Image (spheres, rainbow, N blue to C red):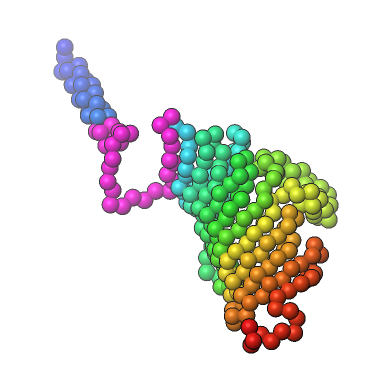
Amino acid sequence: MNKTEKELRFLKIYSGVLTACCALLFVFLFKSNGTRRFEEIDVERINIVEADGRLRMVISNQKRQHPGSMDGVTYEERIGKRPPGMMFFNEKGDEVGGLVFDGSTGKGQGGSLTFDKFRGDQTIQFIHDEEPNESYFAGMKMNDQNMPLNELVERQREISKLPTKVAQDQAWRSLREEGRLMTERLRIGKDYDKSAIIKMKDATGKVRIELKVEAGGHPKMSFLDESGKVIYKLPPAGANKAAL
């Protein structure tokens, strides 16, 4: 064996030992049943998975945020367009809610924690929604959600192909009147005008009972018909607010 062959052999052995050491070090540092402590870590996305690899939660910035999925369908058109935060997934891989936040000074901002109906969209939402003028709603919404999300996405695509906006609006109006779209049924919180409110709505989203305490402290309760007309209210019209 000449000198060159000996040097090549040495390099092969050295390379093999070094690779083995690196592999052992990697396993030691990142083995699945271990716990490691970090004082600080910068990361763009973290996937929380089960032992078999099933995705259960994503913590991500906007660029890498999961676009959402339902019944095995991933909504690729939403890649990079969803807010940063956390997304939750059930054992089937369907999205079932999330915690998101977005906005900036002068453009409005907000955040929400939502929980979804099985194969549907959000039914409970804890929300802060701030307008550019700094007025905001902070509270809770509860929704009726009756159409499977994949069907809703397909309807959206079909309606977007209708020739005029009038036709598109009519198609959405028909779906809402049929009770097929997500409809807000209950809203509780601090409203944009600084009043404390409870609004109860019918299946089409029309307010039927509204309880309110205005920013100045005056309480009100109104009952409305399906056209939005007040049919009864407390205190009665003409009552002296100072006496309340």
Q: Is residue 127 visible?
A: yes
| 215 and 240: which is toward the camera | 240
In magenta, the rendered stretch is 25-52
Location of residue 174 with respect to 130 vertically, above or below: above
> Can residue 77 be seen?
no
Magenta segment includes 28: yes
Residue at 55 percent across and 44 percent down: it is 96
Magenta segment includes 82: no
240 sits to left or right of 138: right
Q: Is residue 176 above or below residue 8?
A: below
Across and down, in percent, residue 71 comes to 61, 35
Q: Is residue 136 left or right of residue 235?
A: left
* Whether residue 10 is situated above or below residue 237 in the rendered picture: above
Res. 72 image quadrant: top right
Q: Residue furthest top?
A: 1
The residue located at (27%, 29%) in the rendering is 23
Quadrant where the N terminus is found in the figure = top left
* Residue at 64% from the left image edge and 86% from the top image edge: 243
125 with respect to 211 (left or right): left
- Towards the viewer: 185 or 21: 185
Q: Look at 62% across and 69% down and name the residue there.
A: 197
Main SS, magenta residues = loop
User: What percent of the width, then of the height, locates residue 125?
Assistant: 57, 55
User: Looking at this view, is 243 or 204 the one in front?
Assistant: 243
